[in-house]
Amino acid sequence: MDEINHKTVFVLDHTPYFGISCESPIDCDFIKSKVPVPPISKSLWTCAVEASVEYCRIAYDIFPAGKLIRFVVSDTAAHIVNTWNTNTQSLTHIMNAMSMVGVPPRQTQASDYSVIHGLRAAIEALAEPTDFQKEQMLAHAKNESFKLVNRGRVICITSARDDASMKSLEDIFRTVLVQQNSISAGHKEYINIDQCHLVIINLYPANMESMVSNRALVDISPILKSEIHSNKANKISNKLTHLILPHFDLASTTVTGIPMKEEQNASSSANYDVEIFHGRTAHSVFLGTELVLPHSLKEGSDYETVTLKWCTPRSCGSSEMQPCLAQCRVTPVDVTSRPSSCLINFLLSGRSVLLEMPKKSGGKITSHLLSAHGGEIFIHSLNTARSCLEDPPSISEGGGGRVTDYRIKDFGLLMQQHRLVPLKPLPERQPDESLQKMRARLTKNSRYWPLTHGRTVLYNVRQFVEPVLVLTQKPEISEEEKMHCLKTIYNLSQLEERQETLALPNMGHRLKGNKKEEQYRLLWSELETIVNYSGSSPAHKAILNCIRDCRRLYPNADGSDPYEKSHTGDGAADALRASVIRATTDSPMSPPHSLGGTAGADSAMAAAGAATILLGTGSSAVPIGGLLGSRGTVSGKKLFNTGARSLLDVLATTERTNSQKRIDFSGRLCTPPGQIAKLYPHLGSKDADSGPGRSADVK
């Protein structure tokens, strides 16, 4: 039972002022007579009683049990109309009591007429426990931590001169409320009022102007909130009809296009509209779907209604029942109108009516069903999506489109590993201790879990890393299991060193051309992520460090080291990285490295960067320092596509290329460096020898 709307008290002003006319004549059809008939109008008291009783009718129709409403009439004293006993919670009892109260007295000289008497009695009524509250207190009598929350609403229909009078009325109500809580603290028959909602309706004739302003809901004190409404007497019924919607969380629906035969001409029919009230759940269950709730402002009122179209009625058989999302009781707003009476009788006869609602994509869909069960009428919110009674949809018809590579087997294994079983409650065990542990474990194991095979590399080649995936899920790893994981990681590193292609399916947009470098880069990244999320024991950290060391052997796709920034200050890691590179790239003929320490390694790297290595001899020598940038790139591009050629291979290839060329010009070989070689150095000497007087050769 909702404690917020559990208790409501009406306080009706029965002072002589409420005996005046509301100045809104009633249209009556009289027989033509020569005697003129004066206009007939209701009194303020009659308008207040009719509107408050109609408020009760709607509440009792939709909530046959649980919502309790009391009436207090105030003149020179407070008159209690009914109690919280369910036997007095009926319209018959209330109407009989109101007839005994009668109309307000005529104007008298007495000055003790006031609505304050009724407000005091209303606060005392809220402090009285109902049968439901008594049962709650009895059931939790031994539970010291249990606290009964007592909340209620007071609707006062009165008349005031101006805003100052309303402010004085609120102050008196707040003072009496605090006094009542003080009394309830030392009285066993009363309970404390934790929250009170005061609604004051100022009533005045239709031909007058009120000096009282409307005011929205405000907090007067921590336990009191109040709102003020100023209305003409002939409009109070619409005001209370509007207020009952938020008071009991109701919604309005207008059924349009109801075909009914004319009363005068039975051969013709016309379409009518009927407004009904029901729980707001009948509309809220459709939020977030493709259905559109056609809201519109109710004519002559200030609240919204949802318009649904009448469909062809059908009998309510078991074979035609449809699965529904919500079911709420229904009551007509205008219970005395002919269209409402015809609709109610039609539904009570055993027929059901489907209601249509427009869709965002165009067209209409049957969204609601009106049907009677056990003499009560309900509105059913139909399930517009796929029914649970139908065959389950194919996995390819999911939210992601026609996706066919879901990891179904892996998901089944995940459910088996996190299956819950009931445990016998023990005094030393917390009620939710095991549940919290399982939630933490499920959160840890699902932090990285690709839904499809096309979004992962690791789970497509899990035969290479199966021990790591299984053993790292344990909270603690033994030394033998740790060595097994390290061996698996080293084997994977050897596969990468040999540049073996991984047998992968079509990976979509994750891989660029299915290059081996990209495959291994994603593989190491996923493996590191999973092990990092698995645990924080020393064995987990050792396995994670091993993965990171092996991943450093090969840069990212852009040529950068993924751990260069995070490990720039770690000298031991740099030395280990240099030793691993030397073991995998150097040849037996490579010169010795300076790895004595960090300073020695830095100086050796600086010397290597400053030197210029010539590949080849003579004019074909190329400075490798000018071609090779950082990590063997040429102008930002990779120099070697394979990535497995060592320095010895490069030098051997260059020598082999040079050996296939022609021998260089002998004159260039004999010419000292820095001078220009002559093409025919003995050309001048031969010309001199052919002439007369040729001198002898110099030996």
Image (cartoon, grey):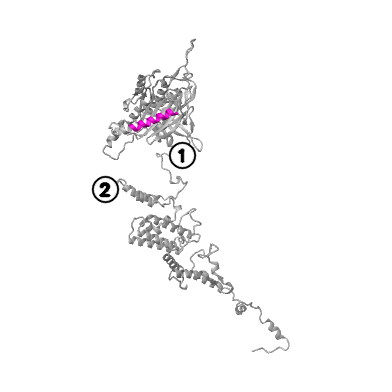
Which tag, 1 or 2, sits closer to the chain's start?
Answer: 1
Q: Nearer the viewer, mark 1 or mark 2?
A: 2
Mark 2, secondary structure of its residue: loop
Residue positioned most to the top: 34
Residue found 50% across the figure and 37% down from its top? 360
Mark 1 nearby-residue class (10 Å; few <14, some 14–19, many ≥20): few
- Residue 507 magenta-highlighted: no
In the rendered view, would you say 602 is above or below 531?
below
Residue found 33% across the figure and 36% down from its top? 149
Residue 474 location (% of width, % of height): 34, 55
Q: Which residue is mark 1?
A: 289
Residue 282 location (% of width, % of height): 42, 34
- Residue 165 magenta-highlighted: yes
Is residue 240 in view? Answer: no
Picture quadrant where residue 64 is located: top left
The kind of residue on which mark 1 rests is Thr
- What is the span of residues highlighted in magenta in the rendered image? 163-179
Residue 414 location (% of width, % of height): 37, 50
Residue found 40% across the figure and 63% down from its top? 490
Say if mark 1 contacts mark 2, CB within 8 Å. Answer: no
User: Residue 428: which numbered mark, if any?
Assistant: 2
The kind of residue on which mark 2 rests is Glu
Q: Which quarter of the rendering shows the C terminus?
A: bottom right
